[in-house]
Image (cartoon, coloured by chain):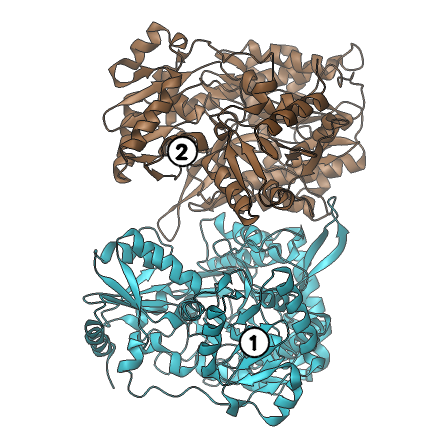
Chain colours: A brown, B cyan
Amino acid sequence: MQTVKQRVQALRAKMREHGVHAYLIPSADPHQSEYVPPCWQRRPWISGFTGSMGDVLVTLNDAGLWVDGRYFLQADAELKGSGIRVFRMGQPGVPSLPEFLEKNLVKGQVLGIDPQTLSIRRSREIELALKAAGTGFVSLSKNLVDAIWMDRGELPSDEVMALPTRFAGESVASKLARVRKEMKARKVDAHFISALDGVAWLLNLRGRDVPFNPVLISYVLVTANSAVLFIDPRKVPAAVGRTLGNSVELRAYGDVAAALQELGREKKRVWVEDTSVSRWAADLLSGADLVTDLSPVTLMKSRKNDVEVQGMRAAHLRDGAAMCRFLCWLENTIGTTKVTEISAADRLEEFRRTGEHFQGLSFRTISGYADHGAIIHYSVTPETDVPMRAAGLYLIDSGGQYLDGTTDITRTVLLGKKATAEQKDRFTRVLQGHIRLGRVRFPQGVTGGRLDVLARAALWSVGLDYNHGTGHGVGSFLNVHEGPRTISANKDTGLPIEAGNIFSNEPGYYKPGGYGIRIENLVLVKQNGVTGENGLPYLEFETLTVCPIDTRLVEPKLLEAEERAWLNAYHKDVYRKLAPQLDAKERGWLKRACQGI
Amino acid sequence: MQTVKQRVQALRAKMREHGVHAYLIPSADPHQSEYVPPCWQRRPWISGFTGSMGDVLVTLNDAGLWVDGRYFLQADAELKGSGIRVFRMGQPGVPSLPEFLEKNLVKGQVLGIDPQTLSIRRSREIELALKAAGTGFVSLSKNLVDAIWMDRGELPSDEVMALPTRFAGESVASKLARVRKEMKARKVDAHFISALDGVAWLLNLRGRDVPFNPVLISYVLVTANSAVLFIDPRKVPAAVGRTLGNSVELRAYGDVAAALQELGREKKRVWVEDTSVSRWAADLLSGADLVTDLSPVTLMKSRKNDVEVQGMRAAHLRDGAAMCRFLCWLENTIGTTKVTEISAADRLEEFRRTGEHFQGLSFRTISGYADHGAIIHYSVTPETDVPMRAAGLYLIDSGGQYLDGTTDITRTVLLGKKATAEQKDRFTRVLQGHIRLGRVRFPQGVTGGRLDVLARAALWSVGLDYNHGTGHGVGSFLNVHEGPRTISANKDTGLPIEAGNIFSNEPGYYKPGGYGIRIENLVLVKQNGVTGENGLPYLEFETLTVCPIDTRLVEPKLLEAEERAWLNAYHKDVYRKLAPQLDAKERGWLKRACQGI
């Protein structure tokens, strides 16, 4: 097995062969996915960094990984000795990737890219930065990592399933009609959809091609009177084909290139969302008039319909029961039988697996004991796994995919008898942030970035913060990270929050080498019945997640009266909803866990 | 005297003469000022709307005024019967000016503009919108309003004064050196400054050309070894010329056009801030390589130095004493002697006038009794003036210019014996917003827009809001509205708040036809001694404004314990600082006003 150093050297040889002075290996695949199938996991292969986001740039004599705050510690650990430097994005004095390129490529040198791995928007940003420096990039038709990756696998060929309308809440015909209405309003001839969750949502299909995200590798091209699904035909069972009927035509995955070129030749007006469609597709469309705005599919998908909302609530009841069984088991096992980070995560998965409609996890469980909890996206491996003792804090961030919904929950629990004053102070401030954001009411028109401060102010007041966003969108039996909105100041897309959106609410605090705290519930946006003076409705969050928050870690004196009332009301509700699903022993545990403070 | 209708008709005749189908009359002057000298007040003249911001568009058969939320009620009142429609910016279904142009100009029709009255940025926005609609604009060398405005005045020719370094805190030489350092870093040959407060700050000059803003009509052109002030030479007394010395060359105001053309001809690289430099200047610079980023002067001016900070604190002590004398006088006079909105404002000005270093008001006093208080930027006239009774609420928003600082304060006071429960509820929620924003601590890197929600959440929680920003920057014996930062989600420029910035903190609530509430203090940004994990300092606000807040309007039950503590501590501080400046009667009033709740 090659080392990372050897792989990077082999890549440099290929770079010289192709006359490029730098080569970019982003996380993304041709669909700009966050989670990608193994054969497209080039960035982890070349660098050894396994986080879900991060770009590697290799030059002839240097190499760097750009990661955000969630991955600073993990990147340091995983890249040790690799010769690849970690660039901590957003930290003072750290150049962004475009800035680094601007400084390190001299006139006449070029960056090599695989245009399938960059969105239209990102490729343009990089193009601009390089232009400013008097350099440029070349699109290489073959991926240079693929050229040196000998045992790279094949594209997955698992069968896809049709999601019945009783889970999806809307027929494919209805969704296509709504998309075509938007297309007509924008006067486009075609809409090309490359985002895998967009395809899955639009055609009520689900797949197993990517870990954790129930998507299928495919593209869709919609026109006024046709919808073509480009997909490996082996993946579509006859029954699914029948379900799609005459309204959706199937063509081979590889045929998409010719279809795009034809639209370009015919100078059609084509809608391609510039954050999810690749530069490769845009180049093939050369000659077409491109509309690069957000896809209507992205927006429609983010507004959950009534069936999806009911499904989400139901899935959360099952998921909450699994979490309770797990927490009860953990409390009774720690200190008597050996439990490690991995065995705990496995046990939780077993509890989830018994739930109706369970399809798998919605992301790799973050199971972090003590100082591992401070690694924001800690991914436990057999090498890092540790036994957990009856002392300190344990952070578990996990979720399930159910036919009727997707869950994502983080709880931080005390394993010892007593928390330190510092731990209680930090936990209570994180909880305050969680409650203040959860309780806010706001007029329609407000973006998520404007609310972010509510989750941070209690930490800020004592000079503390967390280096990640406060919330992300969540799909409905789809991706656990779903665009286009976030509750994050830096990633605010300017899109107002709307009724039907689902977000995570997950402030945290991380003490490197010490412990990590995060409290995460999913929340549903809904109207609260009040209308503002301008006639627009007011919105509020309904908490979907049903699971106790460890009150042994709360310092009641720090809470405002209304915050304490929120916590007690939440626990009353949790008990009422979960008790009927639990056995006597678990119910006893739940009763104690839900006691008022 | 012509009516507005007659003026608009006369303008349309001129428009036909010049072959334009629409004509834009923005508020701005060639320096993109908010307050403009009378001879450049074309928009008020053509429309009758006297607010500080608002753009008029006249087409051959329609006319509209675009105003923001502060001016909705005032615009309705002032434009009644004028034939000019009010477009409420930001309200659902109301087209923006570019959207209106896109829809209402058909192919082949053109918009006429005076390129002096549009910034580079705005002109480009309008250009894009028109291009999308297949139309365009023509720059007319003569302003069409000027062509029909017979009794238009001359440009002011008042003398300017040099602001001693003991008030400015930094010499002109030092400021020029810092600007040149930034110019060198950006590799520009010249920096052209058109913003009047920028010129005044850079050259430590103050003038009387514009109501309320102590600026001088002029431009500055800085190169590596020269600085040219373009100004009517009659305005510069010999002593001021001597103070400027050899480092600043004086040239006639009108010479600026030739100077810009020369830079263009020589293909120089020129820094022109695109929000404050006019399209006219950019066109003259044709041929030059333009850097359009924020001017270093704009940024430096916004970071008050120690002398300016001390001056601001001192000016606020004097200003607070004037406010107290006024509020004491008002309480003792209302119900016994006739007081009107105008006479009250005049009385307050008299109290201010006795303060050391007083130079005039910093803006037209907003003196609004009862329902007039609900007009956010109410500008009382002899026609609207009303006597005030010993009942209801009174809102007064006012400020002074002092040699050592600029003030801006709003207080809402109860004139009757008892407030209604609704008034107390609203007042307390506004106060909560004011306190929550005032108490926040935050890491360096945070923008003002992110903090805005803190001032609104208490109102939002019951479906209420205010239709204006929460805070604006304030100059140091300069413009009371100073860029580039605001505490406003919609106008967030993305620039992090920095130590030395001064903002207003002014949430409000307005009940049309009922009453208005606003509580405004100025706050100074400073480090609080805490350093975050990323090495950047934490910041907090120091309250500069010293004047009691009417506790008779507070509902204590609504306040959190810490909010009540803030209010009591503030009043203790106000009493300590102001009592020594007041006579026995006023001191007695202050003592009662500052009592704890």
C-alpha gap between disc 2 and disc 1: 47 Å
Q: Nearer the viewer, mark 2 or mark 1?
A: 2
Residue at numbered disc 2: A282
Mark 2 and mark 1, same subunit? no
- Classify mark 2: residues with Cα within 10 Å, few (<14), some (14-19) or many (20+): many
Is residue B190 visible in the rendered image? The answer is yes
- The picture quadrant where one finds residue B294 is bottom right
Query: Mark 2 touching mark 1, by CB under 8 A?
Result: no
Left or right: where does residue A263 sit relative to residue A463?
Answer: left
Tell which of A64 and A360 is nearer to you: A64
Residue depicted at x 71% and y 38%: A556
Secondary structure beneath label 2: helix
Give the vertical position of A582 relative to A117 (above or below). above
Is A554 in front, or is B585? A554
Q: Quick check: A466 above or below A44?
A: below
Q: Chain of mark 2?
A: A
Image mark count = 2
Which residue is painted at 44% across and 30% down in the image?
A: A280
The residue under label 1 is: B199
Q: Amino acid at mark 2?
A: Ala
Residue in the foreground of this view, choosing between B351 and A137? A137
Q: Residue A148: x, y in percent?
A: 61, 18
Of residues A368 and A528, the one drawn nearer to the viewer in this rendering? A368
Mark 1, residues whose alpha carbon is within 10 Å: few (<14), some, or many (≥20)?
many
- Against B273, residue A404 (above or below) is above
Residue B550 visible, this orientation = no
Amino acid carrying label 1: it is: Val
Position of B89 compared to A448: left or right?
left
